[in-house]
Image (tube, coloured by chain):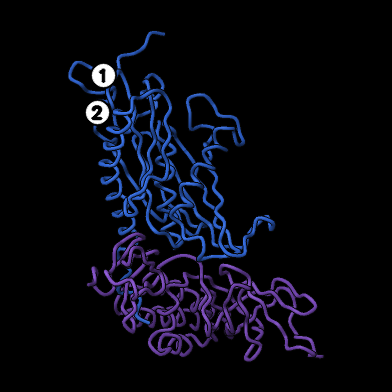
Amino acid sequence: MLYFNENDLVIPGQLLADNGRRSGYGTYTRDGKLYASTTGLVRVVNDVVRIIPLSGRYKPQRGDRVVGIVSDVKPNVVEVDISGELTAVIKPPERETTPLKIDIGDCVYAEVKSVGIRGTMLSIEGLQKIPSGILVKMNPAKIPRLIGRKGSMVQMLRKESGCDFWVGRNGLVVVSGPDPGSEFAAVSAINLIEREAHVPGLTEKVINLLRRLRGGTVE
Amino acid sequence: MSKPKLIDENGLRVDGRRPDELRPIKMEVGVLEKTDGSAYIEVGGTRIYAGVIGPREVHPKHLELPDRGVLNCRYHMASFSVDERKPLGMTRREIELSKILREALETVVLLEEFPRMMVDIFVEVIQADGGTRTAGITAASLALADAGIPMTDIISATAVGKVEGTLVLDINEFEDKYGEADMPVAVAPQLNSIVLLQLNGRMTVEEVERGLEMAQAAIKKIREIQVDALKRRYRVEPEGLEA
């Protein structure tokens, strides 16, 4: 038996179900019963109860694409600050003669290869160095809203603002545009999305904001 | 100075409360911007901010544990929080309370979920009017929940005191000073376990038992306020997450 409705807000210690075998992310079992261990929204995914956290630091997950700042370059490892729990590392393949062309302070866009007790590894395939732009930090829980359904929101932002976006699941976003005016408009739009992530009809609001700001700068 | 009268002929206390009455409590979650989780609590004249940072890398490095996380707790009173200016820096009392708070919180935090990492908990007393350790632990567990730290339960706490032979709930500084005993109690209600119990002064076995019952009943009310504060913080967000 379940003691919640889908998408309910739960708090640590709340009883969720009698059957402890359905324990997913953000839950724990005690005496065969299932309880919440984090604050967030409960959902049943593939018959497993899991909690979608609403706050807290970014917890890396395999396959996530993240934006990070290179914090240290060592002989055989590169450390990247992804504003998560621990710094992530990039390891070039062994006997690689050409060193990675990245240095301390560079902003990179990469995929999380593995997460484990030894830390987070970033994949070397598809590793991009972001040349320039404005780094914006937002709540990682609200990144899905910025991306939108199948990337609809980002596509719209790209089209309306004329800027390039690197959206990291860790809550870091880089905006790079042809002129300061459009970059400013894009950052304003991101802030609007973070502030009003829960409001319906957000896409129209963002389009209106962008057109207003862009119109103002063109004239 | 002669001892003031702490309970009047009607059985009411110095601030007009009944013996089993709590002071007005106010809680708010998510009040500090630069922390990962935070909470503010007001219990009568006691005002406390709690902030949580982490999980993050352990510093100093030698404290790191390979199989579980580390909690670091700091209980600190502002210089202006008490009647007579408290000198800067950590006093012996503050160092002890930091340890007490940490040990109580360690019982509910699922440390295995963040190995090689550390969570910092800061409890800053802005104004002290008795019951700062219990209010501090209540606020700290709210801040932890706000920071998304995995926990088995949220801790609620209050104190029971004895003044003029009567057991009273949630004693203030005045009653603490002139009363006979002070017993802070912190409970994890879902786990049904006491995570902190101290006693300063003298009480009989029956009084301790009755005091614990009083505290348990009051903690139910405190818990409701905590739950309400947490839900208020995230009230508007459910529709926001359509990935």
Q: Residue furthest left?
A: B10
In the displayed structure, B91 sits above or below A141; it is above
Residue A215's label in the rendered image is none
Towards the viewer: B219 or B16: B219
The colour one sees for chain A in the rendered image is purple
Badge 1 marks a residue whose secondary structure is: loop
Counting other residues with Cα less than 10 Å from the Cα at mark 2, is it few (<14), some (14-19), or many (20 or more)?
Answer: many
Please state which of residues A216 and A70 is positioned toward the viewer in this rendering: A70
Chain of residue at mark 1: B
Give the residue at x 30% y 33%: B209
The CA distance from mark 2 to mark 1 is 9 Å
Which residue in the structure is indicated by mark 2?
B19
Disc 2 secondary structure class? loop
**Residue furthest right in the image:** A97
Q: Quadrant of residue B232?
A: bottom left
Q: Position of residue A144 (x, y in %)?
A: 42, 80
**Badge 2 amino acid:** Pro
Q: Position of residue A111 (x, y in %)?
A: 58, 85
The quarter of the image holding the N terminus of chain A is: bottom left
Q: What is the display colour for chain B?
A: blue
Look at the numbered discs 2 and 1 and tell me whether their residues touch, using CB distance below 8 Å: yes
Image position, residue A90 (x, y; %): 68, 81
Q: In the rendered image, which residue does mark 1 sit on?
A: B7
Task: Name the amino acid, label 1.
Answer: Ile
